[in-house]
Image (cartoon, grey):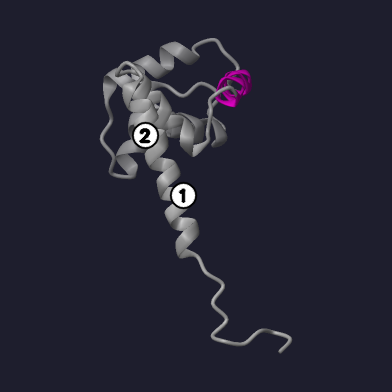
Amino acid sequence: MKVVATYLLALLGGNNKPSADHIKTILAFVGADADDDKIDLLLSQVKGKDITEVIASGREKLASVPSSGGGAAVAVAASDGGGATKTLLLESKKEEKVVEAEVSDDDMGFGLFD
């Protein structure tokens, strides 16, 4: 991720085609290690492409990724044959009920309009 961020920083700084040396220089300036393989992979993936199109394509792909909290537990549990899915869902429902039971509107014996 730091290689991608460095590449984008170089673009924002006015360098239209950052090279591996540019990326390494920026990373060295901030004291980060440069991984040659990751830099080469990034440069090969973005070679000849407009960065705004690459970002737009990435946003479209991320739009289809579920981002709710419950989906991750189901996706993990589905890989074990589905038996644990019911257990996880039941446990999460129990936890929700417990949380609801713990929340109280204790008004210390008097109401707002008493």
Q: Which mark is residue 106?
A: none
Rounded to the nearest angstrom, the CA distance separating label 1 from label 2 is 12 Å
Residue 53 or residue 31, whichever sits in front = 53
Mark 1: few/some/many CA within 10 Å (<14, 14-19, 20+): few
Disc nearer the start of the sequence (1/2): 2
Position in image of residue 21 (x %, y %): 35, 25
Which residue is pictured at 58% across the width and 24% down the height? 55
Q: Is residue 23 above or below residue 102?
A: above
Name the amino acid, label 1. Glu
Which residue is pictured at 34% across the width and 34% down the height? 25
**Extreme residue in the right direction:** 113
Q: Which mark is residue 96?
A: 1
Secondary structure character of the magenta stretch overall = helix
Mark 2: few/some/many CA within 10 Å (<14, 14-19, 20+): some
* Residue 21 visible in the displayed image: no
* Residue 69 visible in the displayed image: yes
Residue 18 or residue 98, whichever sits in front = 98
Residue 45 or residue 22, whichever sits in front = 45
Q: Is 7 positioned to the left or the right of 32 in the image?
A: right
Name the amino acid, label 2. Leu
Label tally = 2
User: Quarter of the image containing the C terminus?
Assistant: bottom right
Provide the residue designation for mark 2.
88
What range of the chain is rendered magenta? Answer: 52-63
Give the structural element (helix, strand or loop) at label 1. helix
User: Quarter of the image containing the N terminus?
Assistant: top left
Give the structural element (helix, strand or loop) at label 2. helix
Q: Quadrant of residue 28?
A: top left
Asked if the stretch drawn in magenta spans residue 56, the answer is yes
Which residue is pictured at 46% across the width and 24% down the height? 18
Position in image of residue 93 (x %, y %): 45, 43
